[in-house]
Image (spheres, helix red, strand yellow):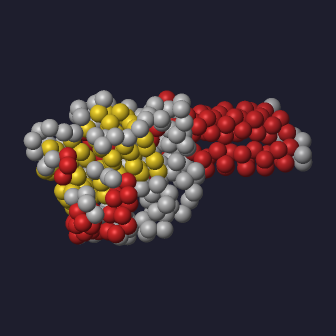
Amino acid sequence: MIVRIVFGVVAVVTLAVLAVLSWPQGFGLEHSIVIAQVVAFRPALAAAAVVLAVLLLAGMLVARRTRGLFGFLTVVLLLFAGGQAAVLATRGWVPDAGHAGASETATDDDIVVLSWNTLGGAADAASIAGLALRLGADVVTLPETPESTAAEVAALMTAGGKPVWAHTSSHGDYLSLSTSILVSTALGEYAVTDTFGDTGTLPSIVVSPVSGDGPTLAAVHPVAPTPDDLEGWRADLDWVDRLCGSPNLIVAGDFNSTLDHLTGIGDCRDAALTAGTAALGTWPTWLPALVGTPIDHVLTTGGWRVVSAEVIQSEDAAGSDHRPTTATLARE
């Protein structure tokens, strides 16, 4: 009897844990410690579940008394792994006809957004400017990029035929405590606005058109959800939520959050999710994009249609631990 009770408790606890990890938003736990960190790596969760299921199958061959429990857990783990794969498949690895914007064609009136956390400028100005020029980027958001690097990128882009305005916000002397944004002069003059406030530990920056004609642009960098900074991370996401209540907004950067954490963030929509590439990991670069976590995003509020979105994997050796992400947006 005791053995059956223990088996039952193990089964119920396992089901509860896997249910929460499968859909933390349904339980309101997506911002909770441990769950917030673990759910960010859905591919790793699926792989770990499959490995554990195989080990349990092997255990069934030698442990007769626990064979029933092991068999039950094996089935549950395989279903859990399949569920993770299904979630990732809905977010997409490659654009296809089933996703809005997948077959759109870019025009000269579209806005190309590039976002790249450069790890304190570890990705040098030449690499950043070269990528921005190849993409024809109109807006470049650069978390962890100091003013000196942003100015050098702006000079290189101007020399390459794409003049830009450069703005930087800093919270200290460390290179990682700066966030920069570059805006094509073709979009008109932009100036920093403090209307929306700022994130806490790491800086974000919001710029608006001086003429009042054009989208509000933001480069954001919420702090990472480490145990010591969990409250700061939640506060930063609340700030993003308020920012995303603004009309005609384009916001990009290192959110230190996946789509699981960004559920219900204001009126913002994720460009990669619309284009069918939201399952590709942007961090860290030493993991394949299929395994990493997608924490860098381009988001928009109303008035913009996603033409395309991509996680760029050609810059993995450029020095940063983040992959750049880009989206092409058209006015609706």
**Is residue 187 visible in the rendered structure shown here?**
yes
Residue visible at 58% across and 50% down in the picture: 290
Residue visible at 30% across and 43% down in the picture: 108
Residue visible at 58% across and 37% down in the picture: 89
Residue 141 in the image, given as x and y percentages of width and height: 30, 54
Q: Is residue 251 left or right of residue 295?
A: left
Q: Is residue 261 left or right of residue 201?
A: right
Q: Is residue 98 left or right of residue 222?
A: right
Q: Quadrant of residue 83?
A: top right
Question: Extreme left residue here?
Answer: 211
- Residue 83 vs 47, above or below: the answer is above
Residue 134 in the image, given as x and y percentages of width and height: 38, 58
Residue visible at 50% across and 42% down in the picture: 277
Q: Nearer the viewer, residue 229 or 87?
A: 87
Q: Quadrant of residue 154?
A: bottom left
Q: Nearer the viewer, residue 15 or 297?
A: 297
Quadrant where the C terminus lies? top left
Q: Is residue 204 left or right of residue 49?
A: left
